[in-house]
Amino acid sequence: MAERERRHVRVAVIGSGFGGLGAAVRLRRQGITDFVVLERAGAVGGTWRDNSYPGCACDVPSHLYSFSFAPHPEWPRNFSGQPHIRAYLERVTDTFGLRPHLRLNSEVHSLRWDTEALRWELETAGGPLTADVVVSATGPLSDPKVPDIPGLDTFPGKVSHSARWDHDYDLRGKRVAMVGTGASAIQIVPAIQPDVERLTLFQRTPPWVLPRADRKISAAEKWLHTKVPATRAARRGLLWGIRELQVSAFTKRPNELGLIEFLARNHMKKAVKDPVLRAALTPDYRIGCKRILLSNTYYPALTQPNVDVVAAGLKEVRGSTLVGADGSEVEADAIVFGTGFHVTDMPIAQRVTGARGTTLAEEWKGGMEALRGASAAGFPNFLTLIGPNTGLGNSSMILMIEAQLNYLADFMRQLDVLGGKIALDARPSAVSEWNHTIQQRMARTVWNTGGCDSWYLDANGRNTTAWPGTTAEFKKVTRQVDLAEYEVLRPPAGRPGGRTASGDRTAAGPRTEVAA
């Protein structure tokens, strides 16, 4: 297609979940209206659109799992379900006038950096375009991961993943195998158990489960939060503060989590009276090493007469016969995989080609790393939301997203201040120093020392997903862009080689503000 036919925008945002919609709101607040939000599906919502399985809900309180700039006093429960969260994101889209910027059914097939023009070339299902800046907000929970099980293609029944639920397939009266015991599985199991003929749970690793302090939010509370906004803010602040106080146990003193383990064991003991089943459901690793799950119905469901627990992973499929790693065999009509997502090997990374002609996936083959969770070296004007080492184990990711939106806003401001056709490329030394400090701190966290194999760790055993500090600290280190950590790029015609120093601050070298 001729270059003149390729539309150009100031910013292209990829994804319309919390990250993408938040970026769109922040750009409009910055006075930037020349942007598009590219969404591969036909509606906004991200993971809260894709995950619609029975029982789907958030494990973070609703008043904390929402934007500070878009409070919602009408949350129906402490922990709201998927339909309410998705409706909230639709409401945000309308309230902030984002629909004109949406490009639905526009999956991004490739992004390539044009070194001469200092812009990104994008090929999408909705047509090609170019952009000065790209914000990747695809999120880590967007592409389902199904294990390579020998013989799975011979299974004659229904095979699905929790994130691609087929609501047209009726599980009632079926023999169902649930593979996995993560956050989705513990919601699906109690939701479908009363209706299926037989439910077999293939449990490779048992999770730690705590009680879920869920309840309906009363009409009086909703009225108060609407009429007196300070009460809503106070509720959010209390929820945030409690979780901030818990961080040191996860990141510095994992042995302090013993009391939480006691509570989890007691929670299980109350529901599971069979000592053999209880032993099978008891983890052998420190609580917090994997994400702590919340449920009041998971353990009771596992004790029902139509439920079997195979304390081993699914090893092989022989037609309709499923074989566990312990040699056990069961017959099934349907298999549901609750086996997570491509978190440390995000597929979008394979589609992004940077200034060196290599893809982000190739650059990250030894492990993901990005300056302040946002900027990868060699990928100018490319920012990632919920990027490497920005994940949380006990609080709301919306807090981390909003911190990164501050960084995005200052990034755009710096481009305007520098003036002209300009790009910022994270210095390799700055990325390396940031990542080195993160990994040093990670070494003493429960995620690295707790004795488990979790999705926080990549294929090399490195924790490239979690943030080893408080959300307040992350907000501090992402409040503004430090130009000393970037190289300033200009078109080759303006400056030989296209690279210039950005003054005394750049000459000073990179600066890392992460406390030890």
Image (cartoon, rainbow, N blue to C red):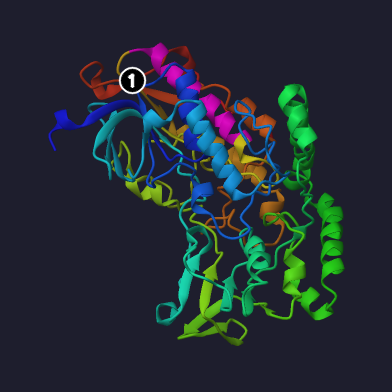
Q: Which residue is mark 1?
A: 422
Residue 110: image location, x then y, percent? 29, 44
In depth, the one of 315 and 55 nearer the eye is 55
Which quadrant: the C terminus?
A: top right
Q: Is residue 115 above or below residue 451?
A: above
Residue 485 image position (x, y, % from top left): 48, 26
Pinpoint residue 37: horizontal percent, then vertical percent.
Answer: 39, 34
Q: Going by the image, does 428 lie left or right of 87? A: left
Residue 433 in sight: no
Q: Secondary structure at mark 1?
A: loop
Residue in the image at 44% along x and 81% along y: 155
Q: Residue furthest left?
A: 2
Q: How many marks?
A: 1
Q: Residue at x 83, y 78 (%)?
A: 274
Q: Is residue 84 left or right of residue 289?
A: left
From the top left corner, tell me how far across and down residue 8 is, in percent: 26, 27
Question: What is the magenta range?
Answer: 399-419
Query: Per the image, is 401 magenta?
Result: yes
